[in-house]
Image (tube, helix red, strand yellow):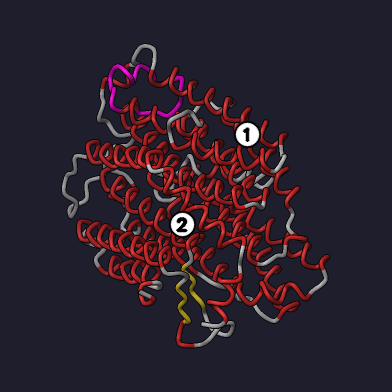
Amino acid sequence: MTKLVALPILLPLLAAALSIACGRNRNLQRLIGVVTLTAVTVISTALLIHVDNVGIKVVQAGGWPAPIGITLVADRFAVIMLLIAAIMLLAVLVYAIGQRGAEQRHVAFHPTYLVLAAGVSLSFLTGDLFNLFVAFEVMLMASYVLLTLGGRAEQVRTGMTYVVISLLASTLFLIALAFIYATTGTVNMADLSVRLEDIPSGLRSALALLLLIVFGIKAAVFPLYFWLPDSYPTAPTAVTAVFAGLLTKVGVYAIIRTQTLLFPADTRPGTLLLIVAAVTMVIGVLGAIAQDDVKRILSFHIVSQIGYMIMGLGLFSLAGIAGAIFYIIHHIVVKTTLFLVAGLIELRSGSGRLANIGGLAHTAPWLAVLFLIPALSLAGIPPFSGFVAKLALVQAGLDAGQYIVVGVTLAVSILTLFSMIKIWANAFWGQPHDATESPSAPITAPITVPTVAPISSPRLMMAVTGALVALSIGIAVFAGPLYRLSERAAADLIDTKQYTETVLNP
């Protein structure tokens, strides 16, 4: 089973190289991508079952022992994230194949997408900070290509904003790595968790804050969120969906991993995290209410919902971190689904602006159902997964006596419901606009490529979106077992002894 740990990284990289070689045959590229990500999903499932039952699996690349060599670590938290990421990457790829757009027109889409998948897997599995930096850079390179596919001026402009902010975060990350290595002589996270205890508490606090800023940019927390609402809506729908559902959660993962593993309780910025979480929730939801475009509304909600995850971490309790992990699982699925629905709305109506669409509940009732379920889940309405996730965090906050933050979460949930009702009332209710009379007309006319066979895109896109809606319902149905799994993962994060001993003393 240990040999499987590296495969979620290696398989997409090898498949990307093969996809480049097969660039003249789009159907073969599609097959390579789907088979590879299916294999990664199966491997991630096997790893999760094994790690949950047996324990942490560690791979030392080249046989070099930690902390000298490259270490890959598969613990419960990492493998949970790996599995949900693999499912989303696979689903969005199939959706992109159905959407006659960037995937069909650009030979670089599939290899770049697979490189992105490799970077995401490396982010979750790496056991040292330097390779976490490498993973972020891999994702950045792939992200910029995917964001600017099509070459429209607006895409390039917003893509440049994304790149500049990401490069700033990378520069700060390198500075943080330099300080950490100069102070401790290592960047291996298990080794750092031991060595950081021996340095002055003030320096530990400074390093914790610096890493929080670096990963906070990636996660789009307040006040570091401003790049996100402009960058995501202009990209192709499939790209936006995987970015919205997954990439910001890589930043959240890094925050949770480093703050729990590397720094003792006396240097963790718990109060600061709770303040940041509350303000992030409020700013994000107010920004969403002010928008009149479906994708921009959903983009601001990414920011708002990140606040809930940071709140769970800021409590630094078993219940709080377990609630944050469960919330991440729920949010990745629901947010990805909502952006896929937004793509279907644009495909159906020719626009994502609320003023230009209407009556979709009459002309496309199945699309209305596909929107309503994840929208209610995002708002935390029972019995959907969002209600269970928010209830877990509210209970953890009440147990910790953080009544103000809990009050903010409840108020933001009401405002989230209001913004979802705003989309429903404008896009799905009322009288149909003339644009909806051509239900399958894409936003842009498809470009004929000789090697690409015609695809019944709306059916495939609807099928994928429906599968993710079913998955979100499944999270609610199996909330008990999933929350207990989240609790076990949280227990591993709080008690780091097993992690460090497994890595340093295999």
**Eyeballing the image, is 180 above or below 480?**
below
Q: Which residue lies at the image location 30% right of the left edge and 45% below the top edge?
A: 95
Q: Position of residue 347 (x, y in %)?
A: 32, 32
Q: How many residues crowd mark 2 within 10 Å: few (<14), some (14–19), many (20+)?
A: many
Q: Which residue lies at the image location 46% right of the left edge and 50% below the top edge?
A: 147
Disc 1 residue type (three-letter) = Thr
State which quadrant residue 18 falls in. bottom left
- The region drawn magenta spans 350-366
Q: Position of residue 351 (x, y in %)?
A: 39, 28
Frontmost residue, 502 versus 38: 502
Q: Position of residue 468 (x, y in %)?
A: 34, 41
Quadrant of the image containing the N terminus: bottom left
**Eyeballing the image, is 439 above or below 305?**
above
The residue singled out by tag 1 in the image is 409
Frontmost residue, 193 versus 422: 193
**Mark nearer the N terminus (2 vs 1):** 2
State which quadrant residue 286 falls in. top right
**Eyeballing the image, is 455 above or below 76?**
above
Mark 2 lies on a secondary structure that is: helix
Q: Which residue lies at the image location 61% right of the left edge and 64% below the top edge?
A: 495
Task: Give the left or right position of residue 35, taking residue 337 as reference.
Answer: left
For residue 81, the mark is 2
Q: Which residue lies at the image location 44% right of the left edge and 37% below the top edge?
A: 385
Disc 2 residue type (three-letter) = Met
**Eyeballing the image, is 76 above or below 68?**
above
494 part of magenta stretch: no
Mark 1 lies on a secondary structure that is: helix
For residue 301, the mark is none
Task: Give the left or right position of residue 178, taking residue 69 as reference.
Answer: right
Disc 2 versus disc 1: distance between alpha carbons?
Answer: 24 Å
Q: Position of residue 125 (x, y in %)?
A: 48, 67
